[in-house]
Image (cartoon, helix red, strand yellow):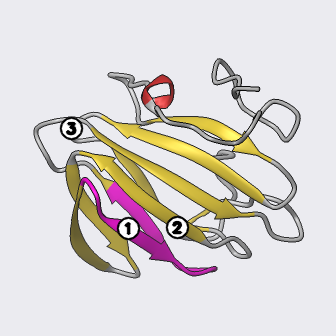
Amino acid sequence: MPADVTKKMTPKTVGTGVLRDLAPFRRFSNDDANVVVTYEDVDQTLVVWNLEPGQENAPHVHPANAHTMMVLEGQGLLLRDGEAAPIKGGDWIIIPRATLHGIRNTGSTRLSYLAVTTNGPEGYVKQNATGAPVGQH
């Protein structure tokens, strides 16, 4: 059974789990960076972040959640613990738990990246740089 990619997938709707095309999850907004939750269960959350030039996923921290990310297209900056590193399509990024991080599209084209996040004891928790809770993803 193929996955139902028309909405967030779950263990019941992921089918075989083989996805060959992430295009349905590359949805952009001129107003703000757009995050599309692709899959979620008790252990992990998978999202695709889509940033137009100049947009960012502002620096934040997950106290009990680790990330692995792959840049799908575009270029920008990884902001991590006060440092900045250039990133581009094809790059892998590893963010340990409780590490301040964010991504900014500094290029002239769209930037998309897939983020796989572990879920801690309280699920997915996101806080801004001062520790205040922020939006779910």
The residue lying at 37 percent from left, 24 percent from top is 31
**Residue 14 located within the stretch drawn in magenta:** no
User: Label 3 neighbourhood size at 10 Å, few (<14), some (14-19), many (20+)?
Assistant: some
Residue 111's x, y, as percent?
28, 42
In the image, farthest residue toward the left:
108
Provide the residue designation for mark 1: 92
Answer with left or right where residue 3 lies relative to residue 51.
right
Which numbered tag is attached to residue 53? 3
- Asked whether the residues under the numbered discs 1 and 2 touch, taking CB atoms below 8 Å apart as contact, a structural biologist would say yes
Q: Is residue 1 above or below residue 18?
A: above
Residue 113 left/right relative to 115: left
Please identify the quarter of the rendering in which residue 85 is found. bottom left
Q: Nearer the viewer, mark 3 or mark 2?
A: 2
Q: CA distance from mark 1 to mark 2?
A: 7 Å
Element type where label 3 sits in the image: loop
Residue 99 forms part of the magenta stretch: yes
Dot placed on the residue nearer the N-terminal end, 1 or 2: 2
Q: Residue at x 30, y 64 (%)?
A: 91
96 to 130, vertically: above or below: below
Point out the image quarter for the N terminus: top right
Label 3, label 1: how far apart the Cα atoms are: 20 Å
Residue 60 visible? The answer is: no
The amino acid at mark 1 is Trp
Q: Is residue 50 left or right of residue 118?
A: left
Nearer to us of marks 3 and 1 is 1
User: Which one is in front, 102 or 36?
Assistant: 36
Q: Earlier in the sequence, mark 3 or mark 1?
A: 3
Please state which of residues 100 and 50 is positioned toward the viewer in this rendering: 50
